[in-house]
Image (tube, grey):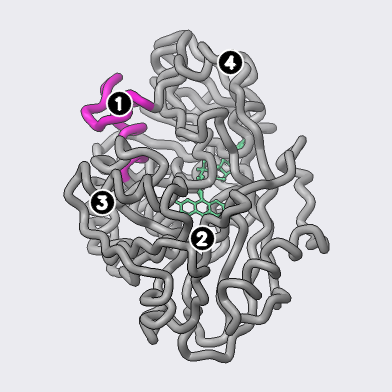
Amino acid sequence: MADVFDVIVLGIGGFGSGAAYHLARRGLRVLGLDRFGPAHDQGSSHGETRIIRKAYFEHSDYVPLLLRAYDLWADLEAESQQQLFWKCGLMLAGLPNSEAISGARLSANQHGLTIENLSASAATQRWPGFRVPDTFDVVFEPDAGFLKVEDCVRAHLDQAAARGATLLFDEPAVSWSSTGHEVRVRTATREFVAASLVITAGPWAAELMSDLKLPLQVLRKPVFWSETTSPACNLDAGMPTFYFEMPSSKSFYGFPSLDGQLLKVAQHSGGELVADPLLVDRQLHDADVQPVSDFLQACLPRVRSQPAKHSVCMYTVTPDRHFVVDRHPEFPNVVFGCGFSGHGFKFTSVLGKALAELAADGRSDLPIDFFNLRRLMAVG
Ligand SMILES: Cc1cc2nc3c(=O)[nH]c(=O)nc-3n(C[C@H](O)[C@H](O)[C@H](O)COP(=O)(O)OP(=O)(O)OC[C@H]3O[C@@H](n4cnc5c(N)ncnc54)[C@H](O)[C@@H]3O)c2cc1C
C-alpha cells in the first residue's frame, strides 16, 4: 500500500526545501525526499555562504523577484528566530563596460536601487583588503550581503516539518510517473502517491527528467578558504562581499573573513564538465588553485594565495545561464526548477514559493515567465 500525499518534493536541497516549506505553510500534506541528509555537502547548496544582491547584472528582470526574496528571507529569519542574512554590501569591480558593472548599473537605474559608484583608488582606500586595478570601475551595493547557506536550507526544512511535512532523507528516488492527475515516486523499497510532484534535483535534474532531454551541463566548482591575518579583511571591519570581473573574462567572488582567520574565495567562470554528479572529483588540483591564487595576489594581497581548505560544489547551467521554473510539458501536475546556473541560491525563498504555487494552483503570480522551458527547447 503506497503512502499518499498532496505534493511530493523530489530533492529537498536549496529549492526543494523552499518549496516544501511554502507547500506546508498552505496546510498541504507534503512529502520531501532526498538521497542525502539535511543540508548535505554533496550537491549545490553547501559551503557556508551565498551572495545575495538586488542590482542584478545578469538581467534586470530578476529584480522584482529579488525584492520578494529579501522579504521572504526576513520572514524566515523571524519564524526560525535566527539570522540568515548578513547585510555587509557587495563590491563589484571590473572594466566600465564589463557585464558586472554595466549590468548592475542598468538594473539599479531601471528599478531605483541604491548603488554607489567609486573609483578604483577610492575603493582600495575605503576597503584596504582590496587592491582594485586602476582601469576598473567599482559599484558598491549596500543592500547586498550574504546568506548562511546550510542554515537557510535547515530553516526551510525545520519550518516545513513544524507544519507537518514528512521529510525523508537517505532515500533516493529511482523513478517517477504521472497520469496527469496522480504521481507515483518510487525509491528502492517504497512507493509514494500524490496529486502533484515538484522536481528540484539540482545536478541530477537532467537524469530525473531524461524524457525532456534538458540542455543542462553540470560543472565542477572548487571553493577555497585562505588565511588572512589582516583585520582589514574581516566582516567586523566592514569588508563587503566582492565580485571581480577581470579583463581576461575570468570572474572571481568572495566573502569577508567571518572568523578573522579564513576568507572564502572562488572562481565563478569556467568549470569542468561533470558526467556523473555522484562521482564528481572532490580532490584539489594545481589547475584549480592557480587562477584563484593569481587573482588573490593581484587583488587581495593580504590573503594567502594558497588555500588552507577547499570544498567542491556543482553548478547546473543552461545555455543562456537563466533558470528553468516551469510545468512539465506533458504532465500538468509535475513542476520543476533547475538550471540555476551558479546564481540561484538567493532565490530559493521566492522560487520555492513559486514552485509551491505552480504545484498547488497550477499557476503563480510571481514574475517567472522568463524562466520557461520553451526558450531552451527552441534553441535545441
Ligand atoms: C560554489 C558555488 C557557489 C555559489 N554561489 C552562489 C551565490 O553566491 N549566490 C547564489 O545565489 N547562488 C550561488 N550558487 C548557486 C546556488 O547555490 C545553486 O543555484 C542552488 O544552491 C541550487 O539548488 P538546487 O536545489 O537546484 O540544488 P541542490 O541544493 O543540490 O538540491 C538538489 C537536491 O536534490 C537531491 N536529489 C537529487 N536526485 C535525487 C533523487 N534521485 N532522489 C532524492 N533526492 C535527489 C539532492 O540530494 C539534493 O539535495 C553557488 C553554487 C555553487 C556550487
Which residue is under mark 3?
72
Q: Nearer the viewer, residue 96 or 208?
A: 96
Nearer the N terminus, badge 3 or badge 4?
3
Nearer the N terminus, badge 1 or badge 4?
4
As helix, strand or loop, the secondary structure at mark 1 comes to: helix
Which residue is under mark 1?
360
**Residue 364 image position (x, y, % from top left):** 26, 27
As helix, strand or loop, the secondary structure at mark 4 comes to: helix
Q: Quadrant of the C terminus?
A: top right
The image shows residue 93, relative to residue 198, as above or below, that is below
The CA distance from mark 3 to mark 4 is 31 Å
Would you identify the image quadrant in which residue 224 lies?
A: bottom right
Which residue is under mark 4?
212
Q: Nearer the viewer, mark 1 or mark 2?
A: 2
The kind of residue tagged 1 is: Ala
Magenta part of the chain: 350-370
Badge 2 crowding class, 10 Å Cα cut-off, few under 14, some 14 to 19, many 20 or more, is: many
Marker disc for residue 244: 2
- Which residue is rendered at x = 79% and y = 62% of the image? 284
**Residue 67 image position (x, y, % from top left):** 23, 48
